[in-house]
Amino acid sequence: MADSGFVSMAMTITMVICGVLTFFFMGARFAAKAVVKSKQGIDDYVLATSWLLFAVFIVISIYTTTLGLGHHLDASFDMTKLPQLLFWLPVGQFFAVWAVAVSKSSFIITLLRLVEATWQKMALWFMLATILLSMGSISIVQFYQCATPDQQGCVPGDSVIGLGVYAAGYSAIMDLVLTAFPTVVIWGLQMKTRDKIGIILSMSLGLIAGVVGLYKTSTIPFISRSADFTYGTAVILIWLVAEVSATIIAASVPFYRPFFRRTKSSGASGGGPSGRNGTGPKSDPSSSYALSNRKRTHDGHSMLDSDVDRWGVSVGDRDVNDSHSDKAILDNTPDSRIVRKTNISVHYTSDEEANYPRGLQRRDEF
C-alpha cells in the first residue's frame, strides 16, 4: 500500500505552488495592462474573483489534510476527525467548483469583447450560461448527498456522482471549444499571419485545462464510489488544482503581448543614427518617416499629402539650381529645362491616439 502521507504532502505542495504561480501570472496581466495604459475591464475583475475563490479552496484543502485527507481510511485512521473532514470537504469543493466556473467565465467575457458576428456572441453567451448552470448545480447538490440510503430529503449518491461527472466533463469540453474559438474569430482579421498565429497560440493555452479536466472527469466515478475516499479525493483535488491553474494562466497570457510589443518598439526607436532620439541628422518635413517605429499601434489611418516644386535650370555655363527660382523657365535657350520634384509626406494616426489621448487609458490590445 502506498504511503498515504506522501499523497497528503504532495497535494499541499502542489496547491501552494499553483496558488503562487497563478497569482504571479494574474498579477503580470494587471501590470502589463497598467504599463500600456489599457483600461481594466469586467473580465479582469472576474478573473481576480476566481483567484480569490481558488485561494479559499487551497486554504480549506490544506486544512483538511490535518483531518486525514490524503490518508488511507484504514485502521490507522483517526475516526474522531472524520465528521469534521466530511463537513469541510464539500465546503472546499464548493469554492473549487466556482473557481473553475468563474475563471472560464473571465475568458469568455474577454472573447465577447472581441467578436462581432451575432452567431459568435450567441455561442459564447450559451457557453457562459451553461457552464455557470452546470457547475453551480453540482456545487449546491453535493451538500445534500445521502449519507445512508434511508436518509430523508437527500439526493442519492449515484445521482450526485452522475451530475458531477457531467459538470466536470462539460467544463472540460468547453475548454477545448474555447481553445478553438480564437482561431475562428482572429483568422479573418486583416493583420499579418505571424501576428494572427501569435495571438491564437497565446489564447489557446486552455487546451491544457481541457486535457486535465477530461482526465479528472474519468477518475471521478471510481474514486467517489471507493471506500477509501479520503485517499482518492486528494488525488482528484490535485488534478482540480491543475485545471484551475491552467485556466487562470491561459486567461492571463494573451494580455502580455501588447507589453512586449511596446517594449520592443521603445527599444527599436530609442537609438540609431537616424532614429528620433539618435545622434544622426534631424529629420525634416520632407524626409520619410520610419513607420517601423510605430509597431505598437495595430490599427490606424494613413494619409498621403503631396506637393510639387518646379524650377528651371539651364545646363552648360548656367547655374544648375538657380536657388529654386522660376526665372529659368523663361529662358529660351536650347539647353534650358524645367525640373519638377514631387514631395510626398506620410502622416499616420493610430486609433489608439485618436480615441485615447495622452494620459488616458487605452482599450485592450492583443
Image (cartoon, rainbow, N blue to C red):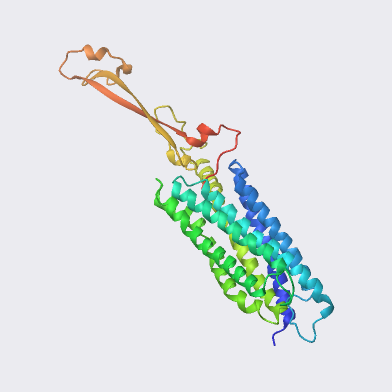
Could you tell me which residue is drawn at 73 percent across and 81 percent down?
Answer: 4
Q: Is residue 319 left or right of residue 365?
A: left
| Up/down of 75 relative to 63, above or below | below
Q: Quadrant of residue 22?
A: bottom right
- Which picture quadrant has residue 80? bottom right
The percent coordinates of residue 303 (x first, y second) are 39, 30
Instruction: Give the image location of residue 289, x and y in percent.
Output: 42, 34
Q: What residue lies at 46% left-to-right and 59% top-to-bottom?
A: 180
Query: In the rendered image of this protein, does residue 296 appear above or below residue 207?
Result: above
x%, y% of residue 263? 55, 46
Residue 252 visible in the picture: no
Question: 37 or 126: which is nearer to us?
Answer: 126
Q: Can you tell which quarter of the image residue 54 is in?
A: bottom right
Depth check: 336 or 150 in front?
150
Q: Where residue 79 sits in the image (x, y, percent)?
A: 82, 80
Q: Is residue 30 left or right of residue 177?
A: right
**Residue 362 seen anywhere in this rendered image of the structure:** yes
Q: In this picture, is 1 found above or below 188?
A: below
Going by the picture, which residue comes out furthest to the left? 334
Count every numbered label the image shows and give the total. Answer: 0
Residue at left 72%, top 63%? 57
Quadrant containing the N terminus in the rendered view: bottom right
**Residue at coordinates 70% horizontally, 81% vertically from top-left?**
228
